[in-house]
Image (cartoon, rainbow, N blue to C red):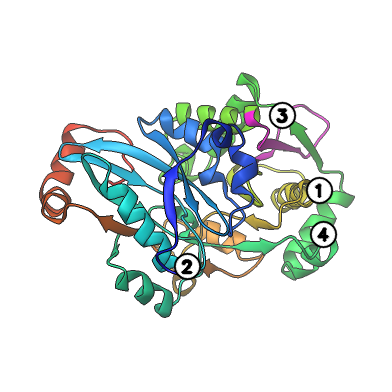
Amino acid sequence: MSGTLLVRAATADEIARWDDLIATNPDGGHMVQSSAFAEVKRGDGLEPRFLVVDGDHPIHVLALEGRVWLGRYWYVPLGPTGDDLEGIVAALRTYAAAQPGLLVVKVEPRLERTPELVARLEATGLEPSRDMQVQTHTVVLDLEQGDEALLASFSQSTRRHIRKAQRDGYRVERVDVTPATRERMHAMMQTVAGGKGMQGMRERAYYDRFWQAFADAGTGQLYLGFDDDGDVPQAGVFVTFAGRTAVYKDGGSRPDRRIAGGAPLLLFTAMQDAIARGCTAFDLAGTPPADRLDDETHPFHGLGQFKTRFGPVTSFLPSFDLVLHPLRHRLWEHGLRRIEWRLRPGPDTLR
């Protein structure tokens, strides 16, 4: 029931076991709630805050703290998620209000978007905000059905490509993240858009930091695909396994290929590994909304055409702001935010 929950800081022991604990969350945990993601975002100047929503079933929450001219903010990526949304928001509001200089907490519970859920959150006093994650609209596959049923759920053309790549000898290798493999992966990611890379790509150092952090934590794997007997990969994907949801984080390929179907075979191999690890879902991480799949002006148009061959688009709840100081927040949001962004360039979760 609402009002029975309490938010507190996680203990040192809980932080040490963080990746195991997020897997017990109602949503099963996700890479953006993991310890590796916390370290990656620390490199962006955001300080991780590990929190627990205490109740009958504790919820382990990663908040990323940043600073702007008028104070501090917290961003809770893809969370917190639970049945008692009203109780979670009330407990978080009480805890956040006691934090000096905290302007706002941005939240985005990992629940499928419906008008009823949006209305429930707005009724708690949350204010709708900009979508922050590419996974707001995405394809999520059910791994609990097993790999045979999973394969059967793909489009006919995707199943055909996977089987043909297997017959033709397309080679998939699970490789360590090293300077050499990072270099190869990044080079393949840059081949789209005439060598400029996908729109919204971060700087090279970010990917190096991300892949290495997840690999070191044991919650990320780099896969390279080869369509000949040489040692130059034709495609690659990086997949995270934090929590019970595996995520297709990054992918790239060379435009020239001898064997078709390598990209879906790489992903299907990662999905089989995710099943073996005990994951229950596989997130393909970002598509256009369902009603814009055919819109060629959408930056994810090509990705959407590829990913929806595996399954349909699911839209999750948008981001919401839990505003603690309305006047200061409004001044920053509508007056100072863009000025600060121009004068202080760099990644900022609220921008």
Task: Give the structural element (helix, strand or loop) at label 2.
Answer: loop
Disc assigned to residue 276: 1
Residue 283 visible, this angle:
yes
Of labels 4 and 3, the one closer to you: 4
Q: Which residues are magenta?
A: 217-240
Residue tagged by mark 2? Answer: 84
Distance of mark 4 from mark 3, alpha carbons?
29 Å
Residue placed furthest toward the top: 179
Residue tagged by mark 3? Answer: 232
- Amino acid type assigned to the residue bearing label 4 in the image: Asp
Q: Earlier in the sequence, mark 2 or mark 1?
A: 2
Distance of mark 3 from mark 1, alpha carbons?
28 Å
Q: Are marks 4 and 3 in contact (CB under 8 Å)?
A: no
Q: Tell whether 209 sits left or right of 267.
A: left
Q: Position of residue 31 (x, y in %)?
A: 56, 45
Query: In the rendered structure, does residue 193 fall within the stretch colored magenta?
Result: no
Task: Give the structural element (helix, strand or loop) at label 3.
Answer: loop
Image point (33%, 44%), residue name: 74
Of labels 4 and 1, the one closer to you: 1
Along the viewing direction, whichever of 83 and 258 lies nearer the viewer: 83
Distance of mark 4 from mark 2, alpha carbons?
33 Å
Q: Earlier in the sequence, mark 3 or mark 1?
A: 3
- Amino acid type assigned to the residue bearing label 1 in the image: Ala
